[in-house]
Image (cartoon, coloured by chain):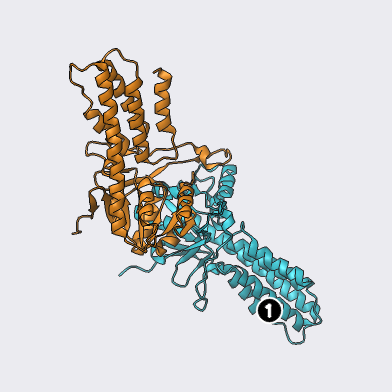
Chain colours: A cyan, B orange
Amino acid sequence: MTLTQFNCWVAEIRDDRTRGASELARRALELLAEAARTLPAVDAMELRVRLLALAAELSAARPSMAPIQNLLWRWREGLTPPADSNLAVARDLAAKRAEASIAVSRRAVTDCATHAARLLGPGRAVMTHSLSSTVIEVCRLLKDDGLRMIVTEARPLGEGRQLAERLSAWRVPTTYITDAQMGLFVAQADAVLVGADSVLVDGAVVNKAGTYPLALAARDWGVPFYVCCESFKWRGPDHPPPELEEMAPAELGTPDWPGVTVRNVYFDRTPARLVSAWIDETGVRWPPAGP
Amino acid sequence: MTLTQFNCWVAEIRDDRTRGASELARRALELLAEAARTLPAVDAMELRVRLLALAAELSAARPSMAPIQNLLWRWREGLTPPADSNLAVARDLAAKRAEASIAVSRRAVTDCATHAARLLGPGRAVMTHSLSSTVIEVCRLLKDDGLRMIVTEARPLGEGRQLAERLSAWRVPTTYITDAQMGLFVAQADAVLVGADSVLVDGAVVNKAGTYPLALAARDWGVPFYVCCESFKWRGPDHPPPELEEMAPAELGTPDWPGVTVRNVYFDRTPARLVSAWIDETGVRWPPAGP
């Protein structure tokens, strides 16, 4: 591996604008498995040092995405090879461990979606915002069960288009709207279901910008607002709250107006008080009963 | 005037996507003045019948826009010519009356903006959504007084771009964001100031879709939410609440997905409880004190 290769791996995670946090976390684990098998190293110790450096860079590349930090941390915790292991054994252990984590993450998404689908039940109109692989899995589970979806476009990149395309292929009756219409259409939904990039210790949800006003509108209309994501998305109490990532202003496609600052913050923070329930691979977590 | 001309006038008001409700109301009055001077008619009575028919069509063309209905109603109320008037006198009266109403409307916008500018005061960060001629006038009044603006793009047509361009020309420091980021940036505003297409009898505000979630976010952050519009935008108690106008789905620029319905409702309804104050040409109206 050259420095170029190392940087390419990090750049792939940093610059990806289409995959959600879970998918990117699994991709980061794939890259670690590849690195474990191919990184030049004279012994197991050097391999370890290099892999940890890569894992640290991959984690730092997407600070809003807790599963990258959590899954990579899990992987690293199990990494310490026996002192006498040789390089080949160390390579194999590190790679296999990464692959096992990928399988665990995939299973968590499926289990999480199963719980969410059961909670929603058949014949529902469900509104979502942006693209979540967990929400897609819920749609797949409910697609022949009378599901109807309301999908926002999710500017600037329009992840909602990908979702609408998928729902169209599945013949799920779908309403597609601008983000600005969310307050109008949430009233027609039986529930809102969103994924998350991170969930903070107190249950606040970091997800694609627009999630917070959608949660406010859902609350205002008395529509339940569910967050559906694997437990890897929860940040530990020792994690600082993530900085909300900001991307290139050019994605908004505006001209260059002197004195005008174009902002493109990808994520917003929905406080826990607006969340009706959190769903993860272990089941549904309701908020504590109020005072 | 031919039937074609009549239809063209109505179509101009119906199909306009760039002018706000006040501007369009004044344009409708200009068309009535032109019609008063040029409509073929054998006598004052026939002229009156034809003008009333045109006014009714113009009013119905934009049901969400109260000032068109209100200003045309005002104009119509003063229209009855003396029984003995001849055609030339009737033409002149009807046209002059329309022109007087235009002046009244212009003056109301200016007075309204003056009250709003005084309420806001110097050195404020003000957030708005979509494009309002009254809000533009407020910006003009405060542009050399330390005003900073936060402007949403306002999909699908992006009226926020026009506003950002104007603010740039005035050297007002401006932050430009997607509609989806409104919940993030309202926290940085000292106040939200929006115009309205209509205000209902109970004080609920019909304005460009996205206004309602912005009002929710403003309330959640404790940021005052002001609605600034002339009294002509208030609907009378006998007016039914307007149907929220829906425009061509093609404006969203999506492909044709089978089973996906693209919706493009232009307006949403912000309940009065989310409005901190209504500002019109007579001053600031605060909500009644709570129980």
Position of residue A169 relative to residue B93, above or below, is: below
Identify the residue at horizontal 38%, vertical 48% (top origin).
Answer: A187
Image-based side of A8 in relation to A143, left or right: right
Q: Quadrant of residue A100?
A: bottom right
Image-based side of B2 in relation to A2, left or right: left
Task: Tell me where residue A103 appears, x and y as whole percent.
Answer: 65, 65
Position of residue B272 relative to residue B122, above or below, is: above
Task: Tell me where residue B178 appears, x and y as whole percent.
Answer: 49, 54
Check disc 1 and report the residue beneath it: A79
Position of residue A49 relative to residue A259, above or below, is: below
**Total label count?**
1
In terms of depth relative to the viewer, which is nearer, A37 or A55? A55
Residue A222 seen in this snapshot: no
Q: Quadrant of residue B25?
A: top left
Quarter placement of the C terminus of chain A = bottom left
The residue at the far top in this view is B42
Quarter placement of the N terminus of chain A = bottom right
Task: Tell me where residue A15 appears, x and y as whole percent.
Answer: 64, 62
Task: Tell me where residue A230 appears, x and y as whole percent.
Answer: 54, 65
Residue A186 seen in this snapshot: yes
Residue count near mark 1 (Cα–Cα under 10 Å), binned few <14, some 14–19, many ≥20:
some
SS category of the residue bearing label 1: loop
Label 1 chain ID: A
Kind of residue at badge 1 = Leu
Image-based side of A71 in relation to B7, left or right: right
